[in-house]
Amino acid sequence: MTEEEVAMEMEAVEAVYGDEAVIVDSYPPHLHLHIKPRTAEISSQQFVEAVVRIQAGPKYPDEPPQISLIESKGLDEQRQKLLMGFVQEKASELSSSLMLVALCEQ
């Protein structure tokens, strides 16, 4: 994978997520994604949100990025682990391919 391909992938993340994605570094990719339910009008769900850090190393995408939760609101420890587990499992499945958009979707 070339640095140019990774840069195009980062642009795609920015295009899809706009202000919800904060690009810390474009290569190797490092971003913070602010996630919250798209159903904010449902009062029981609007207090749940999280900021996920996706940080790739120089061997990305052959080596999946590190994924961690920077902060969360309304998620107990069990749900945090479940969320991180889902995203890390997806990263393993997609090893060796550009995966940032897919991880953000997950």
Image (cartoon, rainbow, N blue to C red):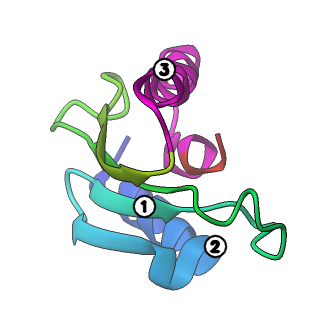
State the residue position of label 3.
78
Task: Name the foreground residue: 82 vs 33.
Answer: 82
State the residue position of label 2.
16
The mark that comes first in sequence, 1 or 2, is 2
Residue 9 position (above or below residue 105): below
In the rendering, at what x and y percent does residue 50 appear? Answer: 44, 54
Image-based side of 101 in relation to 44, left or right: left
Question: Rounded to the nearest whole Å, what is the CA distance between mark 3 and mark 1?
Answer: 20 Å
Q: Residue at x 31, y 59 (%)?
A: 31
Q: Secondary structure at mark 1?
A: strand
Amino acid type at image mark 3: Gln
Q: Residue at x 58, y 15 (%)?
A: 93
Q: Which residues are magenta?
A: 75-103
The quadrant of the picture occupied by the C terminus is top right
- The numbered dot on residue 33 is 1
Q: Quadrant of residue 94?
A: top right
In the rendering, at what x and y percent does residue 40 appear? Answer: 75, 72
Please check the rendered image and state whether residue 102 is part of the magenta-colored stretch, yes or no. yes
